[in-house]
Amino acid sequence: MSGERTAGVSLEPLLRSREIVVFCGSGGVGKTTTAAATALEATVRVGGRVLVLTIDPARRLADALGLEGIGNIARRVPDEALRAAGMEPRGELYAAMLDTKASWDDLVLRHAPNEETAYRILDNRMYATVTGRFVQSHDYIAMERLYDLHSSGRYDLIVVDTPPTRNAIDFLEAPARMAEFFGGRLLRWLTMPYRVGGRRGARLINFASRPFYQLADRILGRQFLQDIAEFFLNFQTMYDGFVVRAQAVEELLHERRTGFVVVSTLEEAPLREARFFCTALGERRFNLDALVLNRVLPEYFQQEAGRAAASHLLEHAETLAAKLAMVGVADLGDSARTARVLRAAAGIYGDYSVVAGREGELREKFSPVPHIVATVPALEDDVHDLTGLRRIGTQLLPSL
């Protein structure tokens, strides 16, 4: 990738060439909104069947798209809603949010060697604990879900909203870690008696391993230990499938049809996270396509003429207010009040100018950026509907 940096360019070439675009960034930088706006703009400008999939459980995506609720099953945003917001879509827009339990249930039912084994897994008391609370469970099933959606061929473009940055690294590495877990030493020890002799296998363990099981029995209880062993023994019948799919997912994420976009604001902490993630993507040889700088103050806050005007306004507020009182507008008749307003306006401009200057310095220090840097200005209002998403989308894909 070229090290040349071009500000203010469009994401449109990426959306035309990629099948999966993964949005990453720290919490609170507007990643979900940016991903949804990109998917919306792709639907309007590029066409095809576009899906925005959120892994982060943020229900505001459904609100912004005008859907009452979204889950594992993708829901289409009605064309009528897009037209009502002033858009004429070339394609179809869908949205889905990862439902961890439903995705695990579906995975077990599809990939267990038979129906009996599938329901032994689903009915085991360990199942809900492992799939609901195991740290890597959510990340792994998210990757499985992404892989299934892409393999289905139903969508021309999938835009993925990932968890906050540090967790996104776990998200990317989840398939390999889950495969390692199910083939790991701990599970081999836990299930060994049962692999050797079935439910009565605990009597058959060798002398060297006995202290471990005696300790586990005292701490966990024999029934609990048996439940664990039975669960993982059944689960390991899908191990080969885990390995195959983990390799397939990893290959998919590294292919040219998958690209990554890092989202950040021009603040110290989010930029530090963005730098970390850009470096991590590079080290893992993922395709880092673009950086989106969100909520950036307008450039005019950094213009010398603007700062000079604000300074003049602050210094001569009383004189200007007295002149304004003479123009015959009733609301400007109180020159003391008008002077306070003028000083406040000049002060606010000065504050924003300082922040804009700091943003510019941070931007210059941000070195490991991709060659595409898209900028979204700070908006006056929060984005809560399709019209707001379009305002962001047109910044990410400006008209030529």
Image (spheres, rainbow, N blue to C red):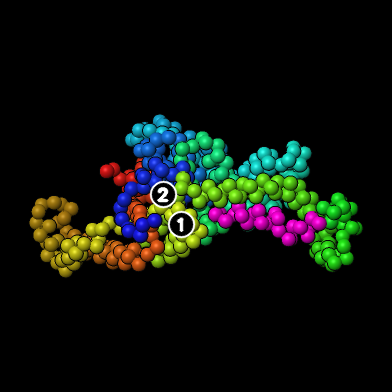
Q: Position of residue 255 (x, y in %)?
A: 49, 48
Q: Is residue 389 left or right of residue 212?
A: left
Dots 1 and 2: beta carbons under 8 Å? no
**Secondary structure character of the magenta stretch overall:** helix
Q: Amino acid at mark 1?
A: Gly
Q: Amino acid at mark 2?
A: Thr
Residue at the disc numbered 1:
25
Q: Nearer the viewer, residue 121 or 209?
A: 209
Magenta residues span: 171-192
Q: Nearer the viewer, residue 124 or 316?
A: 124
**Disc with the residue nearer the chain's start (1 vs 2):** 1
**Separation of marks 1 and 2 at Cα, in angstroms:** 11 Å
Task: Name the quadrant containing residue 40.
Answer: top left
Q: Is residue 229 above or below residue 302?
A: above
Task: State the residue at coordinates (38%, 60%).
Answer: 369
Quarter of the picture holding the N terminus: bottom left
Residue 34, numbered circle = 2
Q: Position of residue 104 (x, y in %)?
A: 65, 45
Q: Residue 63: in sight, yes or no? A: no
Does residue 177 show up magenta in the picture?
yes
> How many neighbours does mark 2 have within 10 angstroms: few (below 14), some (14-19), or many (20 or more)?
many
Task: State the residue at coordinates (45%, 35%).
Answer: 49
Mark 2, secondary structure of its residue = helix
Task: State the residue at coordinates (40%, 66%).
Answer: 268
Mark 1, secondary structure of its residue = loop
Q: Is residue 7 above or below residue 118?
A: below
Q: Nearer the viewer, residue 268 or 144?
A: 144
Q: Residue 264: in sight, yes or no? A: yes
Residue 150, numbered circle = none
Does residue 235 show up magenta in the picture?
no
Q: Nearer the viewer, residue 294 or 397?
A: 397
